[in-house]
Image (cartoon, coloured by chain):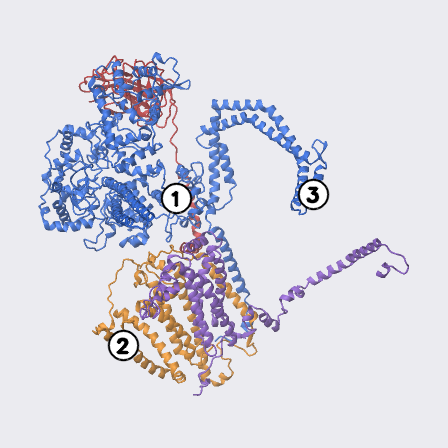
Chain colours: A purple, B blue, C red, D orange
Amino acid sequence: MPEENGNGNNGKRVGLLERVKAGVKEDVQSLRSDMPAKAKEQIEGLKDPTKTQVYTSIFRHKHDDTPRNRALGVLSNVFLHLHPAKINRDAVRYSYTWGMGGITFYLFIVLTLTGVMLMFYYHPSKVQAFRDVLYLEHDVPFGKLLRNMHRWAAHLMVIAVWLHMFRVFLTGSYKKPREFNWNIGVLLLVFTLLLSFTGYLLPDDQLGFWAVTVGTNMARATPGLGNEGPFGHMLGMTPYNDVRFGLLGGSIVDANALLRSYIWHCIGIPIVASVLMIVHFWRVRKDGGISGPAAVMLASEVKEPKK
Amino acid sequence: MSPVPEKDPIVSKSYAAHYVIAMLILMVTLFWALWDESFGQRPWKTFQHVWKDRYSAFLNSARSKSSQSEKGVEQNSQYQQLEQAYKDASETVRPRRDELQKQITDLSAKILAVQNVFTDRRAYVNALTYELETENSASGKKSKQQDIDEYKKKKATVEFPDGHRQQYNFAELEETYNSLKDQRTKLSAELGDVLKPVTEASNKMSTFVSDHMVDLTPTQIDGLKKKTEEWDPKIVQINVAEANIVDRCESCHMNAREPLQITAAVMNPKGEKRPDDYAHAFTSHPEPELLQTHDPDKFGCSPCHQGNGRATTSVEKAHGNYEHWLWPLFPKQNAEAGCQSCHAADMHVAVGDVGQHISNGKFLFRQRGCMGCHRYEGYDKEPEDLTSIAQQLKLFEQQKIDNAKISADLMKQADAASSNDEANRLNQQAVALRVANSKIDGRVQQLDFQTHSLMQDMKKIGPNLKDVRLKLNRDWIPIWLKKPSDFRPTTKMPNFRLSDHQIQTISAYLWQSGFTDALPKQKPGNVEHGKLLFETRGCLACHSIGEGDQLQGGTFAANLTRVGEKANYDYLVRWIHNARERTRPYCPYEKKDIGAEDYAKKGLPYQFDLEHSQCPNDGHELQVQNMTVMPSLRLTPEDAQDIATYLIGQKKQEPSAYAQASFMEDPELKEEGKKWIRHYGCAGCHEISGFEDEGRIGTELTYEGSKPIERLDFALFTENSQRGGKGSEPITDPEDWARLPEGPAKKPWYDHKGFFEHKLAEPNVYDQGKVKSETEVLRMPNLHLSKLEIQDLTTFLLGSQESSLPPSYQYKPGDARRDIQEGWWVVEKYNCMGCHQLTPEQSTILMGMKRYQDAQEQLPPKLLTEGARVDPEWLRRFLSNPSLSTTDTNRNGVRPYLQVRMPTFSFSDNELRKLVRFFQALSQQPMPYIPEQVPVLSTKENDMARSLFSSTAAPCLKCHATGDPQHDKIATAPNFLLARERLKPDWAERWILDPQAISPGTAMPSGLFKRENNHWVFSGPTPPSFQGYDKDHSKLLVDYIFQLTPEEQRRVAASMGRSQASFQPRNQQKQAVRQTETASTDGSR
Amino acid sequence: MNKKLWAALFLLCLLGLLAGCSKKENTNEEQGSSPSSEVKPAPASAPIDPATAARVSGTVTFGGTTPKGQKIDMSQDAACKGNNMAETIVANDGKLANVFVYVKEGLGDRTFDTPKDSTTIDQKGCQYHPHVLAVMTGQNIEIKNDDDTTHNIHPTPKDNREWNESQPPKAAPIEKSFAREEIMLPVKCNQHPWMKMYVNVVKSPFFAVTGADGKYEIKGLPPGNYTLAFVQEKMGEQTQKVTLAAKDSKTVDQGFKP
Amino acid sequence: MDWRQLWEICSAPDNVPIVGLIPLLIFYIYLAWKQARANDELIGQLETNPAMAKTHHRKSWPFRPGWQKEIHVWPFLLRMEFLVAMIVTIILMVWSITLNAPLEEPANPNLTMNPAKAPWYFLGLQEMLVYFDPWIAGVVMPTLIIVGLMVIPYIDTNPLGSGYYTWKQRKFSIGTFLFGFIILWIAMIIIGTFIRGPGWQWFWPGQTWDHNRLIYEVNRDLPDLFGITSNLGKAIFGGIVVGGFYAVGGFIMHSLFRRYNPKDYKRMSLLQYSIMMFFVLSMVALPAKMLLRLAWHIKYVWITPWFNV
């Protein structure tokens, strides 16, 4: 066809107009014949969405209930990747694990989310802080719920951490090879308490103020570093240069303390705790998953190390 | 162990049921959270729904009532006239109006047609012009300009609404457009003019309706109804950023600002007997006038009422009635406490009914001597001011010495300077310093002046106890101290619950430290005359006499029923004659009482008074008066003796019947007494030897209301008061029980109100159950307050808070209102209201007395418009000497015919100024006052005025005093000769036109003049000379009165057949005028 | 929230348990309370039937010696001529004049129309005529000045509005009325201190003032129990109870003692 | 019995977690105890029956050959985790809707709260302030607790009981831990919350917290009881007593530990053994000091110019 449209041997010169006309006709023809076919194909394709490119780009494996897919479901998911594909059959027993580690982590996430939202409304200044809390309580939609959830989740988290530690001790899960992870856990416990403690001051009310005053007054007595502690005076400690001053940014709980408390609460400690948490989880995997429930050992089977 | 199952439970167990249940519960909690957020936390929504129903129902009934009364108004003939006028007017203008309206409609259509084309073309021209302006090359500009010109020349077709077309170029188009628009403007203006009479008539109708309707008109109510019915539940809030006020009170109190007066009863649902909580919440503000001056949009609600304005989650939260809110809603009975947060500087904050409690609380705080023990910002400032002045003086002295030294130095340097320039410069500096010293001298003099004033202003609530030996029956003192209210039930002296031993020691100290100077012996007087004087001179405006039902008189000062049992006659005479007369002056610098011996040492006469108030020893200002507010009534010594004789006879038992109290001479007891006097702070209210500089023993109360509740010591009743219920009332004494404003506690009373009320009802209540030593027990005495007084004081204390509002909210006016503010402190200090009515709602003690029921003209004058009435300079002179004379002082200067006497208060210059300014400001008079010039009357006018003044129809001289003693006996109004100096002419004219409007109930009748041909014409028969006089008769009369001379007055009186007016009164009058003049020069120290 | 809500939740559980039995009681209570809530209004006052109207009359006497009339010194104003005796107590042969008699109690809620005709106070010879006047609330009072001097009329009421108007000789009468009930409302003239009179304003038309013979008569009273009050300006009020049957005509005398 | 007071303390929003903690702890201790008993029973069986030990799956839970030894995380673990998350969410939401986080008056440095209490989880330490100087209670003790927890894996040389609940195989370590956790930590918190009222005074549950209560208490120092007055004497005497406590206590502990825990004793190095001894004795010292204080009102044992113990 293109040949015929050119300056053919016949010498018959086909006008430009003619050629354009023919071309357009052809285009219309193709629209008529191709589009229905393509539409049909498209609809056919939609019948099985798991085969679409979008789907397969997200989900890398099939979901037929095969052992392989079960494993892949965990392995190929960034969030579930914390877990191994398969675990000890009894490790799912709640009576053994108490689920406290998971609950702690879950509460940490809840706290992060509610905390971030609270940060939208809160200014860590002496003038604003208390008003902001009142504002949250009275004006912000769901503000009261938000604050309540943040506070109670924090308390719940402290309890969960304690119970987690309690369980880990009772099942002897700190024993070789998990000694180091136990230590990380102890640090996480400390940071959990510190997180909660630094948050206590933020509403800038009497409760927080005096709790923090009592709490930090103890720092005054740090041996050597507090002005009231043993040897403090000998080392030149005064209320204006001791460790309490460093913690509060002043000799009394005031604007600086509020700001410090805020920054530790929202940035400092969460970052450190998150890093430690990552290490903690990673070590759980590396140390061979959770310790149990393991088969009981008999005293007679213990191999005494050689001296 | 249970048997092992076939299938692996871990793998085979289904959690579907768990999931379903957990999911369901989770959903429920989520919905619960949602519900809580939108309803649980928003109870005001329910309020608004209920409000909508009830308020609509109320408006419906109000609507029918209103339309009924509107109908009533519309049946009024006046209204019908107006309506007729309206109809006539609209009828007259109708043809022209219709025509104009049609023309305007047509024109508008035409304008639209032109406008469409014109704006399109103008836009194109504008775009081209922009290109021209931004074109760089000259040639380009030229060609663009051509384009524009060409375009403008092109014709465009406009199709008018009537169908015809016309072509215009751009300029024509623009012109057509503008001229059409002009035309329309003109027509509209004309339409407005044409319609003017119609709109005016309709306005008149609606004004008439609203003027004659007591409540709202049906149209207004319809507006409210519509608003109510269309209401969507939403938060209603007042937000004042500058004061950090966010008040959402009106989200529930929906009717707070409604224009109708809405009570709980009308918002009650039908069939309910008692208004429920909703009904109470939906009342309108009970004092809408208050909201006019305190616009809620600026002030919010919480600055006055407190509570948590932001909170909307529950009634308790919103009202701030929960544990951790520091500013709970003021209780209803103490609502006026809120006034104090801005009006702390006011002594008197009453407007109509509002503010009586807080004002009375403030008054009581001073009057009952609370400030003797408790500092409170603004109260009893004089001692503090004196201290600060003394310090300033010291500084100035030092500065002067320094300046003199430096100046001498500089001059020395100048003498030795190397160049003339240098010498001149140094000399100038030296001179400048010397000038500075003279300025300091000026300041020092002012401060000395201030000191003089302050010493004069300084008062004590209780009597001077340095005079006990001269004044009192020795044996009476211990009986009195035991329980003052037993002797005198209405006394201000509180009960300190002293032990017998304490009483002995205290009275011993007082007795032994008292003056022993000799008093002049006084002759006995006439009891009958004394009684008459006591009852008529005005003593009863402050003092009372009689007990129980027989009690008459005021509560400001002591009840004198048993004064004969305690007082010494000679002292009493001196006291009545002039209470301010001191036995010995006191020198605060030396801290000693100065006696004749000190004066003798310097060879000075033993004379001390306000003019001779310098210490003979060191030249410091002396306290030369008794620190009492009791004034001098300018009585003759004989009159004073008569009154004293009458009073000394007032007793229930003989003074000698008191048990001998010889222990009071025991010097050992005296020493201990000193300790107890200091312990109980007696010197807060009394002058006592050796305690002149004693400080206050109580806590400062300026911010008592915002003291943390933990700091208020409920002692053993902390728990009880928190729990309330049976047995939580600690007060057991029935007398004190009866003082509690709301009776014995039932509900928890662990709050400021509860603390104050209990403390005031029984000041030692918090000692109950405690084991304490004599010096540890609570010292606050029982003031025998009534329920109402406790309520008022509690209100005052509750309001005494550190204000969280910005300073601009404090009521500290800089203008005339400040004079009013300051004046009240003085007015209430001296109990001016005992005799004078200052505001229409206030009544005086004397007004209520039987004696004056039938003789109201004998009452002291009302001062409702005093500032407008009198010349301020005259007022100052009058206040400093109300007799207006230096010799003839046993009388009233203005109203000699009154039995009751305007006393001499010996006001300091300071207080005189405050009072004068106060009266001027109270009547909205400008300060300073520049007297209006009264035109000099022509002889003819003078004759006319005289003939009117002396005609029998004009009864002026019947009542007004003339100076003729015969006539003045029956006179009931002041002498006209005083008018010129005393009155303001404009006021005088207003006065004679309608005195009842200025001083309701005055003896001066209204209706003396009537309005005729736009002039005030005398309403009686006028003398013939008035024929054809076309000015105000009232003005003529006032001018005449202001020019009246004693001679003229005598002449007139004589012509009226009072030839008795001899020469004597004439002389007296002359004298009086001269005296006034001398008084004025004396007064302006 | 918090504590209260916990308590509420707890109560809710309890309520759920008790729901069955409590329902019945509620309904009973509601039914029981409804009839008692209606309060019976006072019976509307029946119109007075002239046919049954009763009449009460009598004489007021003055016990003891008739005080000598005090002379008033009117020399102050030449225009004041005529009777210059004070009218505080006017008694003739023991008969007391100027006593105001009215029905103080017993008329219930009845309201009466204000009479259209006005009463008059005449100022003649610097005295008021009458000395004691009785009017109904709102009734017009016309005050005339027949003297050759200016008077001012100054009532000093307790419960009504005070006013004080001047009236030159032969001026047009002043018309006034009083809106509220007040007994022995004093009226005086400030220019002639002795001039004094009393106006009695009452809500009912059942009143009278004793004449010089001490007699009074009140007509048209519906049958009933009444309290008659006798008021004298100086000696105060005395009351007597009287029961009137239809068409009764009773005599009630009253004695005053100094 | 003051029920209102009791209710007030228990319902204070920040005390609610502790009120919740008590039943929770009891529940979990019961859970652990049940499993430990089952395991111990199994261990006893296996020890007496070596044949069974060879074949048994060695868990107290039932098992059948053929059952998977390892199971997939998805779905078996994840379904559990998700369920727990849901339940926690429910608890948290309900708690947050019904109970408001406390918010008291704005901070006011001039108004001391009475009692001024630290956050509840530090109340144990605050309670220690009664018995020890702040530098011990506030600094040394928390440090020792942290360090003590961290050294646990390194001094616990017992290889048994790893990964399962048991009592029999770890009597000493579990006993010590329970003592530390329950008695020294949780119980102290409970005392600090519920028992300590205004002025940090001891109020029995149901006793009214009276702000005015005054208690006469003379606290003596141990050296005073023995009439030692000189500072040097006090320092030396105190040092001897404290040192003696560690020496004598250590000896008693040693004799007991050696006797009843010979295997661990054998396994432990000197360092491990002495660290363990130090911590165990310090833990015992706490109640000992409390006893001295509460029963005999002894404030300090060891007084030096620099510090007091």
Q: The numbered mark 1 sits on a residue in which chain?
A: B
Q: Can you say which quadrant of the picture contains the C terminus of chain B?
A: top left
> Residue drawn 45% across and 36% down?
B259
Q: Which mark is residue B79?
A: none
Q: The numbered mark 2 sits on a residue in which chain?
A: D
Pointer 3 residue = B142
Residue C38 location, x and y as percent?
40, 37
Pointer 2 residue = D241
Q: CA distance from mark 3 to mark 2?
A: 113 Å
Amino acid marked by disc 3: Lys
Figure check: B166 above or below B722:
above
**Callouts 1 and 3 on one subunit:** yes
Pointer 1 residue = B809
Figure check: B721 above or below B971:
below
Kindly give the residue lying farthest to the front in the view shown: B419
Residue D240 found in image quarter: bottom left
Label pair 3/2, CB-CB below 8 angstroms: no
Residue D286 location, x and y as percent?
32, 72
Figure check: B421 above or below C211:
below
Figure check: B177 above or below C27:
above
Amino acid marked by disc 2: Val
Is residue B7 in view?
A: no
> Residue drawn 71% across and 61% down?
A42
Tell me the SS state at disc 2. Answer: helix
Within 10 Å of disc 3 (Cα), the crowding (few <14, some 14-19, many 20+) is few
Q: CA distance from mark 1 to mark 3?
A: 67 Å
